[in-house]
Amino acid sequence: MGRKKKKQMKPWCWYCNRDFDDEKILIQHQKAKHFKCHICHKKLYTGPGLAIHCMQVHKETIDSVPNAIPGRTDIELEIYGMEGIPEKDMQERRRTLEQKSQESQKKKSNNQDDSDEDDDDDDEAGPSAQQVAAVQPQTGYGAPMAQLGMPPVAGAPGMHPGGYQGMPPIMPGVPPMMHGMPPAMHGMPPGMMPMGGMMPPMMPGMPGIPPGMPPHMAPRPGMPHMAPAPAAGAMPSRPVAPVAQPVVTKPLFPSAAQAQQSTSGAVASNSHSTAASSDPPKATFPAYTQPSVSSSSSTSVSSNPSSSTVAKPPATVTNKPATLTTTSATSKLIHPDEDISLEEMRAQLPRYQRLLPRPGQAHAAAPPVAAVGSIMPPQQGMPPQQPGMRHPMHGQYGAPPQGMPSYMGGMPPYGQGPPMVPPYQGGPPMGMRPPVMSPAGRY
Amino acid sequence: MSLFGTTTGFGTGGTGVFGNAATDSHNPMKDVEVTSPPDDSISCLAFSPPTMPGNFLIGGSWANDVRCWEVQDNGQTVPKAQQMHTGPVLDACWSDDGSKVFTASCDKTAKMWDLNSNQAMQIAQHDGPIKAIHWIKAPNYSCIMTGSWDKTLKFWDTRSPNPMMSLQMPERCYCADVVYPMAVVATAERGLIVYQLENQPSEFRRIDSPLKHQHRCVAIFKDKQNKPTGFALGSIEGRVAIHYINPPNPAKDNFTFKCHRSNGTNTTTPQDIYAVNAISFHPVHGTLATVGSDGRFSFWDKDARTKLKTSEQLDQPITACCFQPQRQHLCICFQLRLVEGPRVLQPPEKELHLLEERCRGAEASEQEMIRRAKSHLLWGNAEDLLH
C-alpha cells in the first residue's frame, strides 16, 4: 500500500477499530456497517451523508454512527476509508500497534510452534469472510473474540503471563471492569479500557488475557479450573444466560483451547484488544471451533472438529452426545443443545420409534425444532410416558394405512410395500436411533 | 436436509401461480397450497425431471409415507399416489427418466417406487436410518447412492440386494447432493467429503469445513458450462458457506454469509440464530434459495454476493424446498408444529406451498434487480427492497 505518511500499515476503521487488508474492503465495511441507513438500508458514503439522507428522506435525525464504539460515534466527522481520521487518533493507533507488536514478538517466542500454521488458516479465512456483502460477520461469539483474533496481535497479550505470574490474583478485579465492556465489545480502542487504575501499565487487552493465558499454559485438562474466573471476567452477561454455568464458559474455552493451535491465545478473553480488528470471522473460528470442548457433562474433549491433530474419541465412548454452545451474550442459537441433527432428535421421539405410522399422537412431544424455542421442557415428560405409550395406540396399529383412509377416495390404490411389522416392538427395532444416543434417550 | 430439485432439469412452460384465498398469517404471500398434505411434517421434496411429461411433486414425510402430486399448469395440485414405509421418510429422489421414485427412510431401507405400476420394492438396506438418497446416472453405470446414519455411503444397483460399493464415512451422513460427476456429503462432526463419480464412485477429497457448526444441508451448484463446480453448505448456525472445489483463489472465492437470523443489526437484544434447513439452486439463474427454521426463505445471488429477497416470516419452520425450474416455482414445506402442553395440541399445519419467484441473475445491477423483483413478486412487501 502506497502512502506511508498518513496511515498505518494496514487500513483500519476509525469507527470500530477493525483492521482490514485493503482500503477498498475497509470502505465496503464502513458503508455496510456505519453508513447504512437503518430505515431503508441505503448505503451512504460518509457519516454526514448518512445524516443528511436520514433527514431528507425519512425526516429523522441521527446523532451517532451505527455500530461504532463509544467515543467514535461522531456523525459530523467526515471519514472515508482512512481519510479524515483525526491525527490524534492516528497516533494513538500507531502507538497501540507498536506496543502490540512488541508483545507479539515476545509471545511468539513462547508460542512458536503453533502460531505460524494457524496464522495461515486464520488469514485465509479472513478475507473471504470479509467480502460477505450480505451480512456483517459479527456474531455473538465473534464479537468478543474477534477483537483478539489478530494473530500478530494476539500474541502480544499472551506475552505477559510470562512476566506477570501474579496475574491470577488480579482476575477477581477484572469483572468490575468488564461490566462496562459488553456494549463496546467490538474493539476497545486503546485507552478506552477503564482499567480502574488496576493495571495502567498493562496493555489494554491484558485483563482479559490473564484469564486466557493460564488455560493456555495448562492444556485442556486444566481448563475446567479456569472456568469460573474467566467466565466471570469475560462475560458479565453470562450469569444471565439460561445455560448452566459450565456451559457458560464455552466461548472462552474453545478459544483458550485453540490458543495452542492458533496464536490467538488472547482470543480466550473477550474484547478489549484494541488493535485486534482482524476480521471477525478469523477470530470467530477459534471461538467457534469446539462446541463441545468444554462441554459441561461430557468430559469428552471429543469433538475438536477444526483440529486435525486431536483425535476424536469414537462415538461409542460418549454416552451423551456432545453439546453445543447455544447461547452467548449477543446471540442465541435456536437449536437444542445436543450436537446431533434435528432429524436424529426427532427420530428418537417415541412416536417414531414404533414401526407403524403414528401420526397425530396426542402424547407426542414437540419436535425439537420449534421456532418458538419450546424445545426442552415439553420433552421432559416423555420418558414416563414411554411405557404407557403403547396402549393408547390401539385402534391404529395393525391397519397399515394409518391416517390414509381420508385419502383413499381420490387416490388410486397404492402398494403397501413390505408388510407391517407387528405392533409396538421393544428394544431391537429401536435400533433406529443413531448409535451414539443412550438407549434411554432424552425423550 | 439434502437438496432435491437440482437433479431435476427443466419442466414445461407455465403461467403464474394464482392466489390462494387464505391470507392469514401462514400464507401471507398468496401461494398455492398443496392439497392433501401428509399428516406429519414433510422431510423432503422433489420435482419430477423434465424428461417426463407432466409435472409431479413427491414429498416424503414423518408420517412414514411418500406422496406424489401432479402439479398442473395453474399451480393447483392433485394427489396421485402414495407409498408407505415403516418409518419416517427422510429423503426421496427421482430417476432421471422420471419413471421411478426412490425413497429413504428411518426404517433403514430404501425403496424404489415404480410409478407406472405403483409398486414399491426395497432396494437398499443399511444398519441405520438412511438420510440421503440420490440417483446417479453415469455414462457407464447408473445406481442409487444412499447415505446413512450408520456412517456408510452405499451404492446400489437396483437389481441386486447387495451394494455395488460401500464407502466408509467418518461420521453419520447428514446431507448429500449429487450432480454428476460430483457428489458431496456432509456428515456429523462437521465432516465434508467430496466424491467423484466417474467410472466408479470414489472419494475425491475431504474438506475442512468452512463452517463452525453442525452441517445441515448441502447443494451443489454449477458453473456457466453446466458443470458442477462447488457447493453451498448450510449449518444450524444460520450461515451458509459457498465453497468452490478448485477455485483460482480460495481465500477470495470461498465465503460464508449469515442468514436466518432475527433482528438484523439491532444489537440491543440477543440475536436469534436459526438453522438453515435446506438450500436449493435455481437451475436457470444460479441463484439460491435458503429456508430456515425461522420460518423464512431467502433468495441470494452468490456471484454478486447479495441477498435478493427474504420472505415474510411464516409461522413455522420451513423444512425443505426445491425449485421447479422452468416454471420458476419454488416449493417449500413447513414443519408440523405440535405444541406440547397439558393436553394441548395445535392443529397441525403442514402445507406445501408453491411459490412463484423469479430471481434474476447477477448481470443486473442491484437497482435493476429490485425493479424486476418488484414487478414479479406476488407478495406485497416489495417495499422492503426499495431504497
Image (tube, coloured by chain):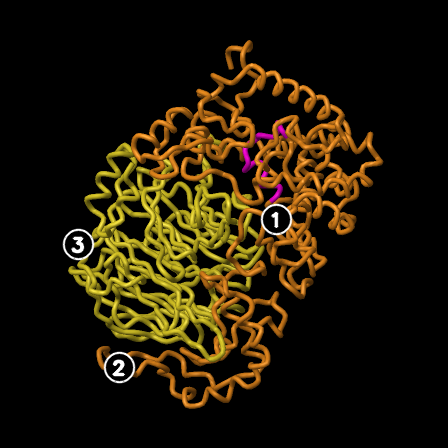
Chain colours: A orange, B yellow
- Please state the horizontal and vertical placement of residue A291, each as a whole percent of the image: 61, 51
For the residue pair B350 and A230, the one nearer the viewer reads as A230
Which residue type does callout 2 highlight?
Answer: Met
For the residue pair A287 and A269, the one nearer the viewer reads as A269
Q: Chain of mark 1?
A: A
Is A284 magenta? The answer is yes
Q: Which residues are magenta?
A: A274-287
Residue at which label 2 appears? A408
Q: Chain of mark 2?
A: A
Q: Is residue A358 above or below residue B306?
A: below
Q: Secondary structure at mark 2?
A: helix
CA neighbours of label 3 inside 10 A, class few (<14), some (14 to 19), many (20+): some
CA neighbours of label 1 inside 10 A, class few (<14), some (14 to 19), many (20+): many
Q: Are discs 3 and 1 less than 8 Å apart at CB?
A: no
Is B168 magenta? The answer is no
Residue B88 visible at all? yes
Q: CA distance from mark 3 to mark 1?
A: 46 Å
Q: Are discs 1 and 2 less than 8 Å apart at CB?
A: no
Residue at x 68% of width, y 24% of height: A100
Which mark's residue is nearer the viewer, 3 or 1? 3
